[in-house]
Image (cartoon, rainbow, N blue to C red):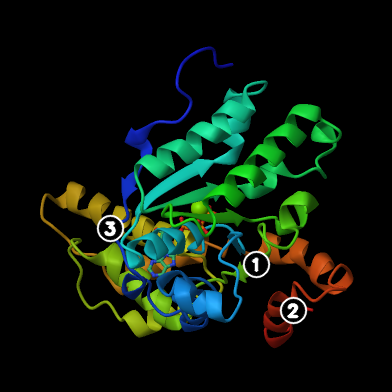
Amino acid sequence: MNDGEPVALDEEVQVAGVRLADVGGMEEVKQRLEIAFLGPMRHPELAKTFRKSLSGGLVLYGPPGCGKTFIARAVAGEMGAKFYPVGIAEVLDMYVGNSERAVKELFDVARRNAPCVLFFDELDALGQKRSHLRNNSWLRTLVNTLLVEMDSVAGKNEGVFVLAATNHPWDVDTALRRPGRFDRMLLVLPPDAVARASILRYHLAGRPVAGIDIEKLVKATEDFSGADIAHSCESAAELALADSVRTGTIRPVTMDDFKTALRQIKPSTGPWFAAARNVATFANSDGEYDDLLAYMKKRRMV
Ligand SMILES: Nc1ncnc2c1ncn2[C@@H]1O[C@H](COP(=O)(O)OP(=O)(O)OP(=O)(O)O)[C@@H](O)[C@H]1O
Ligand SMILES: [Mg+2]
């Protein structure tokens, strides 16, 4: 519990360091970001003409490890803004009872560092569906403070932009999902072929390799998350390293190492889609999960 210490720190604000061009593939996500967020933010006068509200935040959702945080950071980079990631669960854990001040301080830090993307990770941690938090008055206060702060930065050219991410959008507090709030959701799916190639290249760069066939690896890693792919590269590198240690000479990472590594690694996105299936089929009356449903149909998951 916090007493007197500042709860939000300027030191946690980061230089974005990446742009959308660094996100491999995922053209659909980039296009939607451009239409729903970046375009209007870059041209507030046009947005006004078309009565497009600049208030509210965009929620990135999807299976774990598939690039939500990476994309949020790239959006900040694209806007020439700093990146301020905040784990909601962390804030909740530390500042129970002092949550109003905590939220205000987060926005103050973002304002001081404007232009700045304030990125709320694990937005579902504010979910009222979690039974132990239901009817919890301090949680309601926190949600309300968050909404007030969001309204206050929206459209005022304060240079604070709010993005959020969650793996469980169905657990996000309904009060947060109303129009003008976190009312737009963007599905971030497992990396497509182009994205997988770029993730593989990124993780192999700087490691000694020989005879790596990226196209083959791209095919072998369908449904893998970005994190799964990173893990595969780690494992393959470990095998080559073990050999090198044994013989005392550098033996580069080969396709055989990947074959061995991939035999033991299953895509971690499976359980997420299993859980998402019910929501997409039975709780999609207002169409908010249409994208998810379309993908799952295409992949014959439903
Ligand atoms: N399209 C992409 N191009 C390049 N790298 C990517 C891409 N998608 C994901 N990655 C990489 O995959 C890894 C996982 O991404 P990230 O941490 O952003 O996922 P996440 O969806 O935020 O996961 P979590 O749900 O665990 O928070 C990161 O190392 C990221 O750089
Ligand atoms: Mg993340």
**Disc nearest the viewer among 3 and 1:** 1
Vertical relation: 72 (above or below) 298: above
Task: Describe the element under mark 1 as helix, strand or loop.
Answer: strand
The one nearer the camera, 154 or 142, is 154
Residue type of the residue flagged with mark 2? Asp
**Residue 214's x, y, as percent?**
33, 80
Q: Secondary structure at mark 2?
A: helix
Q: Secondary structure at mark 3?
A: loop
Q: Which mark is residue 17?
A: 3
Judging depth in this view, the residue of 292 and 78 nearest the camera is 78
Q: Quadrant of residue 296?
A: bottom right
Disc 1 target residue: 184
Tell me residue 268's x, y (percent).
59, 60
For disc 1, the neighbor class at 10 Å (few under 14, some 14 to 19, many from 20) is some
Q: Is residue 58 left or right of residue 280?
A: left
Q: State whether residue 169 appears in this view.
A: yes
Indicate which label's residue lies in the foreground, 2 or 1: 1
Q: Position of residue 199 (x, y in %)?
A: 36, 69
First reached walking from the N terminus: tag 2 or tag 3: 3
Give the Cα separation between the discs numbered 2 and 3: 33 Å
Horizontally, residue 33 falls left or right of residue 115, namely: right
Where does label 2 land, which residue?
290
Label 3 or label 1, whichever comes before in sequence order: 3
Q: CA distance from mark 2 to mark 1?
A: 13 Å
Name the amino acid, label 3: Gly
Q: Residues within 10 Å of mark 2 (few under 14, many from 20)?
A: some
Relative image position of residue 95 (x, y in whole percent): 60, 24
Residue displayed at 63% across by 29% down? 100
- Look at 80% across and 42% down and name the residue there: 128
Is residue 232 visible in this depiction of the protein? no
